[in-house]
Structure formats: structure tokens, C-alpha cells
Image (cartoon, coloured by chain):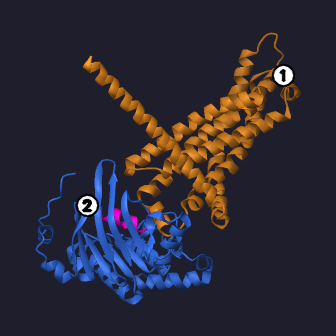
Amino acid sequence: MARLSSVALQLQQRVGGAVLDALAAVGRFAGLLLEMARGLVEWRIWLPRTIDESYTIGAGSLFIVLLISSFAGAVTALQAGYQFTGNIPIYVVGSLVTESIVLELGPVLVGLVLAGRIGARYAAELGTMRVTEQIDALESLGRSPASHLLIPRVLACLLIIPVMVVFANVVGVLAGWVAAKQALPISDQDFIYGARVFWRPFDAYYSVIKGFFFAGAIGLISCYMGFTTQQGAAGVGRSTTGAVVTSSVVILLLDTVLAKLLLHP
Amino acid sequence: MIEINGLAKRFGSMVILDDVNLCVREGDTLALLGPSGTGKSVLLKHIIGLLRPDAGEVIVDGEHVESLSRKELSLLRRRIGYVFQNGALFDSMDVFANIRLGLTDQEQFRDIEYAKERIAECLRLVNLSPDTSRKMPAELSGGMRKRVGIARAIAGRPKYVLYDEPTSGLDPVNSDIIDALIRRLDTELNVTSIMVTHDVRGAFRTADRIALLTRGCIVAEGTPDEFRASDHPDVRAFLERDFELEPS
């Protein structure tokens, strides 16, 4: 009986500790958001850095985004062609490629790949700056880390990732079109007809809205993880992994929530 | 003047500072000695408001650092230069941009001609050639990084300079250069300095006053002669290099 109550007490302590840690993390995250909101007035500092950062992540991410979206479009077309045999009209391949890429694959694949590419980079950069006291140095000079480091990175994500989603959509659909023509008995007219028959302009907005939310998740989570890094090189490693994993999970969560809110209100 | 009264700080269950009392008068150079891991750097970070105390107060020029607003703290930090242990140079920026960030007055920061002149002057003060300004931190030696860190700290003409282990990791020749530099800067710029170190020789060469921090509090303080003559067992043990770190 005594052993049972001891185990119960340990369990309570662990659960309580985990809850307190989670609340502390929420508090730190809210504090970071507040710091960023305050830092917005220092536009002379964050604006040029945002432009530089946008160019850096945009130029650096374009190739991988176009590559994965090409493969996604081609594979979608080929698999659709494999499944839609018999009585299903061939133009449906055009519908399926376009809708799959624009509604789901474009934004989600871009989000997940850039969570790895940009999120890991931001968390590692800021984490290294934290453990080498560069962030303390910035504060000691009376300067705001939010306006120098955080706002430019988050804004660059918000500016560039939706644009990447648009590129991914266009290239993914074009790659699907080319792949479908190579492997299936489909004409250009069939593909275009299929692409247009179920198309709604809102689909494009929905794709960009998703890209915008995913960008916010990647920027905020990776900056938070990097900024709150502790305990040296191992801490930087933990922050980087945590940023990628958490951003990816949040992207999938947002994907579901946005589908429910925007497609089935 | 910098006053520290009853300062206490703990991280988790580990007590780092426990009732620290210290006063640094204007124009003084205080060397804060103590073995590694006794909270010397933690004490410095309280002075500039990078850490908040669990108890006690830190008063700089009559302002209670722990209760300052974000804006007031930012203004206070413009009067204090902080030299970090490993330089803490921004590794994505060249030396020029690093030192320019030390121009804490925004008008001066934006005036590129003033910035060029002041950065050249700061590099001269720390015995570095003007060409250094174009180098990246990764291209600098350990001693040069420390000197660029000092140049950045003094660029905004601070009233106080806090040095965190300015000679750690340097060979004796470079340590002597940094010690001489600190002495010269204190004289030429008339700043009030606190230098955290465990280099006894450097402390005696540089400081007007010496304090020993151990077991979370200041156990002895005085002029170099008073400190050398102290019969406090911790001072004797430290000076004779026979100091045993308390188990944590």
C-alpha cells in the first residue's frame, strides 16, 4: 500500500512538473511575442535586415522547392493515371493533379521542407548566438534582440514562404501535366479542361493562406527554440531538432484545422 | 557609483550568490577575484541587468537596476560597456559592423562619417590596425577578438566598463598586452571599471581595489596592498594558489 502511494506521488510530481514546464514555455513564448510587438516600432532596424533575410532564404530555398514540387506533380499525375482506368474520363487526371497540388501538396510539402531548411537554420543560428553570448552582447549594447534578430526572420518567412507556395503550385501542376502527357493518353485540351472543371479561385487563396500560416509557424517556433537555447552545443542540437519536429507537427495540425475552418465552415 | 546590497541569486537548487555587498566608486578599477564557478560573471550580468536578482539590489548612479523599465534599462546600458569573456563578437558581421553596434547613440550610429572616425579611433586605442575593420571575427586570433570586444564596449564612450575574464585563454604575452590596455583605457578614458578575473598577477597590475568572491559572497576587499597583507584564510589560500573549490 505504501509502495502504491509512493508511486502515485511520483506520478503526481512528474505530471505536475510537466504541466509547470509547459506553462513556463507558454509564458516564455508569450513574452517573446510581446518583445517582438514592442520591437516593431524600430522599423529602421528590422526593415533592412528583413530584406536581406528574405533574399537569403528565398534564393536559398527556391531550388529545393521547385525540385520537390516537380516530383510531387509528376508522381501525382502518374499515380492518378494508374488508378483512373476504365470508365473514369481521362481529363480527371488534370483535375486531380491541379487540386491535389494547389490544395494540399504544394503548401504542405513546401512547409515541411522549409521547416527543415529554414527552421533548422534559424534555430541553430540563434541557439549558437545564445550560447556564445552574442544575444547577451546585443542586449548589453542597449539594443533589442527582437528588432535585430527575431522580427526580420519571422517577417522574411511570412513574405517568402507564401511566394514559394505559389511557385511550387505552378511548377507542380506543370510537371504533372508533362508527366501525364508522357505516360497517359491525355491531350493538352483534356488536361486543361480537367484542371478548370473543378477549379475555384478560392483554391488559390486557400493555398496561399495555408502557406502564410505555415510560414508563421516555422518563423515563430524556430526563433523561439533558438532564442531560448541553453547548455552549449548539445542545447543547440536540441533546439534545432525541436524546431524542425515541432514546426512539422504544427504544420500538419494547422493543415487539418484550416481545412476544417476554410473548406467546411 | 555602483552599489550592490544583499544580492542573492540561485539557479534551481544551486546557490550562486548569497548576500553579496560591494561598492565601486567613480574612477576606480576593481578586480573581482575568485575561483572558477563562484558567480563572478553572474554578478557582472546583474549590474547590466542581463540577470534579475532573487533578492537584494544593484544601484548604478542611484538607479535600481532590478526595477528599471525596459526603456530605462536600455538607456542605462548605454552608459555601461561590457566586455564578454570570449569577445561575443557577432560572427555574421565584420569588425567594422561589430564596433559600430557599440555606438549606442542612434544619431552617431546613423552618421557614417562619425562612425568611421570613431571606429578608427577605437581600433587605435586597442592597438589594432585600421585594416582589421574589414576582417570577419573568424579571421581574428583570440587576443584580437578580445581587443575588438573592448573596442566595441568603449565605442559609445561609456562611463563604466565591465570586463568578464579579459585575459582568460590568452598566453602570458597577450595577457600582459590586455592588462596594459585596460590600465591605459582607464587612465585615458577616465572610466570606472570592474574586471572579473582569476588572474592574480593581472589583478594586482591593473586594479585600484581588489575583492575576493567565494562561496557566494565577498569575503575580502581592499587596495592591492591591503589585499596582499590580508590574513583572511580564503585570501591567503587564493594568493598562494591553494584554493579548494567548495563542492557544489
The residue lying at 24 percent from left, 82 percent from top is B205
The answer to whether mark 2 and mark 1 are in CB contact below 8 A is no
Residue type pointed to by label 1: Tyr
- In the rendered image, which residue does mark 1 sit on? A91
- Residue A230: percent from left, percent from top: 41, 50
Between the residue at mark 2 and the residue at mark 1, the CA separation in whole angstroms equals: 78 Å
Q: Which chain is orange?
A: A
Residue A18 falls in image quadrant = top left
The residue lying at 24 percent from left, 73 percent from top is B211
* Circle 2 Cα neighbour tier, 10 Å, few/some/many (<14 / 14–19 / ≥20): many
Q: Which chain is blue?
A: B
Q: Is residue B73 visible?
A: yes
> Given the image, what chain letter belongs to the residue carrying mark 2?
B
Dot 1: element: loop
A2 lies left or right of B155: left
Q: Residue furthest top?
A: A86
- The residue lying toward the viewer, choosing from B18 and A249, is B18
Q: Which residues are magenta?
A: B38-49
Residue type pointed to by label 2: Gly
Dot 2: element: loop
Residue A195 falls in image quadrant = top right
- In the rendered image, which residue does mark 2 sit on? B216
- The residue lying toward the viewer, choosing from B126 and A9, is A9
- Tell me the chief SS of the magenta region: helix
Residue B39 located within the stretch drawn in magenta: yes
- Residue A51: percent from left, percent from top: 67, 60
A182 lies left or right of A241: right
